[in-house]
Amino acid sequence: MSDGPIASTQTVTRYSRHDALRILRIPARQLRGWERAGLIVYSESYSFQELGQLCKLRDLRAMRLSAARIRASVTAMQAVSGMLNPLVEAGSARSGSRLAFRHSGAWMEPVTRQFVFDFDGRQRVFEVEGGLTQAEKAQRVSTLFLDAVRCEEAVKLEEAIGLYQEILELDPNHAPSAINLGTIFYNQRQFGRSEELYRQATVSDPGYALAFFDLGNVLDELQRVGESIEAYKRAITLVPKYADAHYNLALAYERRSERRKALRHWMAYVKLDPVGPWSNHARSRVKAILEREKLSIVWRREAS
């Protein structure tokens, strides 16, 4: 018998990079930015705990804290406390332009190594709303969000709906919850409720391309093609290489028989996603439009 560690028969669930981005509604470019800043290690798959860290980073981004400032606060907290990963091991909240952490029963800014008090003796992060401090509310929202995602993955949709609704009561501007809840209703063909939630997400985070993409999808289902086109165009303005938005925008233009406008986006999709059935369909549409409209492709060098 080996005297080594006992092997566990329990399967540890890991989420692919694609699934993590989908579940948490994080743009791929944002994840790459956090990796470049050293806030999370590059990986092709993530544990549930690592999803929690990504969720925390996403929430801090929503507070308009830059990756550089988060990195500075995390590094300082590691030096002060000896924690390996303060974002997971300690409560955190925005304090001015920096990040404050809960440590040894008190809130402190590790960069300045000062406890977070105003001159009149009130702790800035302890702004109580509905019986919860800001930090407690942020922690509660993060926990509920991961619970809701877990329920979705287990197809416990009624539980997930309840959790997302609870989050939005705590924080009406929590765009990822609005999007995820809107998507549940979209899949249930409750398009009116879905549209309302997607619009809420676009207002909460006007830079969130996925919110505009999803809004375009539901408007298309409601046969409001003109509005769906504007939503897709907004998504592409925010993320010019958003392949799926180019694809759906091309479809929408074709529904209005605006084939020359559709052509541009079919070609963009083929360039961004050159392999697979969707790309094959896009190529077939490019060919059909060129033949119908008596056009030829003129390739131009992109401006540098």
Image (cartoon, grey):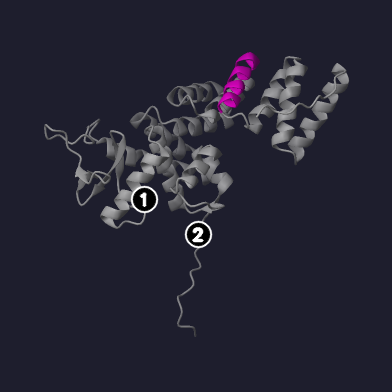
Residue 81: tell me if it is visible. yes
Q: Residue drawn at (30%, 43%), measured in percent from left and top?
A: 92
Q: At which x and y percent is residue 5?
A: 45, 76
Kind of residue indicated by mark 1: Val
Nearer the camera: disc 2 or disc 1: 1
Q: Main secondary structure of the magenta part?
A: helix
Per the image, the residue denoted by label 1 is: 88
Instruction: Say whether disc 2 or disc 1 marks the residue closer to the N-terminus.
Output: 2
Does the stretch in magenta take in 226? Answer: yes
Q: Is residue 180 above or below residue 56?
A: above
Magenta range: 222-238
Residue 278 lies left or right of residue 77; in this view the side is right
Tally of marks: 2
139 within the magenta span: no
- Residue at 50% x, 38% y is 30
Q: Please state the horizontal and vertical placement of residue 265, each as a whole percent of the image.
A: 71, 25
In the picture, measured across the screen, residue 143 lies left or right of residue 45, that is left
Q: Secondary structure at mark 1?
A: helix
Is residue 144 in view from this perspective? no
Report the residue that reaches farthest toward the bottom. Answer: 1
Residue 25 placement (x, y as % from top left): 51, 37
Q: Secondary structure at mark 2?
A: loop
Judge left or right: residue 44 versus residue 272. Answer: left
Badge number at residue 12: 2
- State the CA–CA distance, disc 2 to disc 1: 19 Å
Task: Please tell me in which quadrant of the rendered image residue 183 appears.
Answer: top right
Looking at the picture, tell me which residue is in the foreground, 135 or 43: 43
Q: Is residue 241 left or right of residue 200?
A: right
